[in-house]
Amino acid sequence: MTELFEQSPLYQKIVQEAIQQGVQQGIEKGIEQGIEQGEQRLLIKQLTALFGELDAELLERIDTLTLEQIEQMAEAIFQFRSLEDVRKWIESIENSQKN
């Protein structure tokens, strides 16, 4: 009985649509992750150019930022005078998430 159902055109259509939807969602998620990683790398390069090599702790904190936060930080980058300013900026973002 199950085999007959699985062979029906309606079942096949539903399965195909589900597969296509899953593939599309996977592609979109991959694109979003790629954009986020690219912007994150660019931000790290900019900070490194301004202040020298970043320590592991700061890199980890940058890694936790969302795409929106990375973009906000990129806009604020010219206000930073030191890595301490960068840390304080990230800390303010982290604290705002807790509230």
Image (cartoon, rainbow, N blue to C red):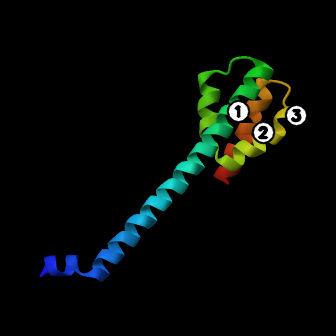
Q: Nearer the viewer, residue 21 or 76?
A: 21
Q: CA distance from mark 2 to mark 1?
A: 9 Å
Name which of mark 1 and mark 3 comes first in the sequence: 1
Residue 74, given in percent of the width and then of the height, sits at: 78, 39
Number of numbered discs: 3
Checking the image for residue 79, the label placed there is 3
**Residue type at tag 2:** Ala
Residue most toward the left?
1
Q: Residues within 10 Å of mark 2 (few under 14, many from 20)?
A: some
Checking the image for residue 30, the label placed there is none
Residue 64, given in percent of the width and then of the height, sits at: 60, 40
Q: Nearer the viewer, residue 29 or 64?
A: 29
Q: Nearer the viewer, residue 18 or 48?
A: 18
Quadrant of the rendered image containing residue 47: top right
Q: Mark 2 sits on what residue?
A: 74
Q: Mark 1 sits on what residue?
A: 42
Q: Secondary structure at mark 3?
A: helix
Q: Residues within 10 Å of mark 1 (few under 14, many from 20)?
A: some
User: Could you tell me if the residues under marks 2 and 1 are in contact, i.e. CB atoms within 8 Å?
Assistant: yes
**Residue type at tag 1:** Leu
**Residue type at tag 3:** Gln
User: What residue is rendered at 35% in x and 76% in y?
Assistant: 14
Question: Left or right: where does residue 64 sit relative to residue 49?
Answer: left
